[in-house]
Image (cartoon, coloured by chain):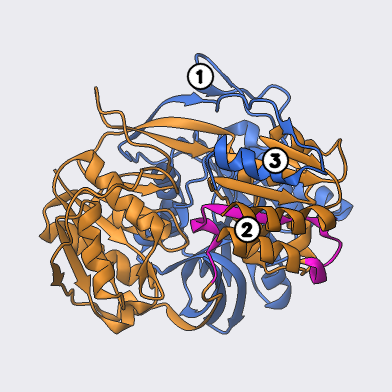
Amino acid sequence: MAILVFVESAEGKIKKTSIEAVAYAHALGGPVTAIALGAVEKAELEALGKYGAQKVLHVADDRLSQGIIQAYATVLEKALQDESANILVLANSSLGTPVAARVATKIGASLASNVVDLPKTDGGFVVKRSIYTGKAFAWVELKNQKKVIALRKNAADIKEVGSPAQVTPYSVTLGDADFATKITSSEKATGEVLLPEANIVVSGGRGMKGPEHWGILEELAKTLHAATGCSKPVSDMGWRPHHEHVGQTGVKVAPQLYIAVGISGAIQHLAGVNSSKYIVVINKDPEAPFFKAADYGIVGDAFEIIPKLTEAIKAAK
Amino acid sequence: MKILVCITHVPDTTSKINFTDNNTKFDTTGVQFIIGPYDDYALARAIELKDAIAGTTVTVLNVGPADTEPTLRKGLAIGADDAIRVNADPTDSFFVASQIAAIAKETPFDLILMGRESIDYNSGVVHGIVAELLGMPSISPVMKLDLEGTKAKLAREIEGGKEYLEVSLPFVAGCQEPIAEWKIPNMRGIMSARTKPLKVVEPKAADSGVKLQKFELPPPKGSVKMIPADNVPELVNLLKNEAKVL
């Protein structure tokens, strides 16, 4: 049962959620081949061997340094065939999930996205998916021999299990139809911790009273090597960019630690954070509903507490 | 131009989620159903395009049993011209996508819009499957969509930013905010929706190889530990030594 893992990169580095996908495939058992497309650092590719990839394929086609959904799906279909792999594992993302949809359709695979854990394999191959925006789970049997599995963050623990792998150049002939969609430009926050990838998230809400007060949250985030997020009203008012909006209709996060500052905790916001391992809520209103969903809480003025918290974390390091 | 907007019939975002029948069925008791919030953005953008481009028609489609018709009627009240209901339980993404593709094969559309994902099953794959079945490009999640003749300019959200794209019609897009402002039906819309055509079609067979076994609710959350505002270092201590996340 050979397994192919599609690994994504950003600025030449393999994304953490993609390394989790390699770890997931390794835990399934069976030879694991990882495949990366576009510009990626060689050492990053070799390191995939440590997490369980026996083989690493690299398609060094510059046109694929941009995430073109159709072209990626064509490459993965061919790679599955060449590697005689029946299972494709990848990370849920703005690129991975749409690509998974197309590949599964091409090869007639059972498809599951938003998968949160390793499958149960006693009697079928049954995966656990997050549904109702984190409010519930569904156990779903993938009955076809071919399977495509898109993982949520933290679906597998990253462990060092092997040594660096050889990187094999790989190529697929692509046609015009694969490039029917043209990416003309992109805007990307560079050097910051990406919200969906972050182990710690610091989020602010309306209680921050204005975009000019975000400095103290950014300072706290920097100290924790965390990503910054925000509530829907904050992104609606343009205080923060939309890609930082955490919630039902924004980014769903699953960090180890979520720190919510000045966010009351509307059910739509909770839907985006309820997969966090630990939640800290800081709010001046003791009746804020978010405290009910929190592990730790402080009632008080964020403008006094946040700088103190940043200092205390620096001191504890 | 013909636009197809695929909408889902989903529990309101404030709904408490419960299951019945030994955790195999969603408990609809006391649950209010709405057009999926992402689908609502797609529909709003389609209506804007209809208003801007002469001769444009908008069809709304839902795969669901008869009790989902009020949701389709709401789509008509918002401004769609006609509606199609595929008479089946929307059991999984491949099944739903196959129904949409079958309809679009019979009656070609220039543009197929839907939400980036449904807020019940959160799969986020139906647009990609529909596009693959129809041999079209698919783009998701789309935050901006402008048409110039048969060319479209789009913005797509990516992790930590945005990507700007160009593609020719026809294509499939999974939409999200801020592609358009949600539209609230007015009285005239609600009245006219009653008489707009709503066609019911029977489903085509489509086996996805996916079978739901059971639902599960997450374990209840333990109670919150409050820390006095004048003892912030205690929070750091707990995060470090109790939660072990620092």
Specify whether residue B9 is in view. Answer: no
Give the chain letter at badge 2.
A
The disc labelled 2 sits on which kind of residue?
Lys
Q: Are marks 1 and 2 on the same chain?
A: no
Q: Which residue is mark 2?
A: A314
Give percent across and percent down for residue A162: 17, 52
Under circle 3, the secondary element is helix
Compared across the picture, whether B188 is left or right of A114 comes to: right
The segment highlighted magenta reads A192-213
In percent of the image, x 38 and y 37: which residue is there?
A: A117
Residue density around tag 3, few if under 14, some if 14–19, many if 20 or more, within 10 Å: some
Q: Which residue is mark 1?
A: B23
The disc labelled 3 sits on which kind of residue?
Glu
Compared across the picture, whether A127 is left or right of B235 comes to: left
Residue density around tag 1, few if under 14, some if 14–19, many if 20 or more, within 10 Å: some
Give the Cα distance between marks 1 and 2: 47 Å
- Whether pointer 1 and pointer 2 mark residues with C-beta atoms closer than 8 Å, the reply is no
Q: Is residue A95 magenta?
A: no
The blue chain is B
Residue density around tag 2, few if under 14, some if 14–19, many if 20 or more, within 10 Å: few
Give the chain letter at badge 3.
B
Give percent across and percent down for residue B134: 37, 62
Q: Which residue is mark 3?
A: B234
**Figure check: A93 above or below A2:** below
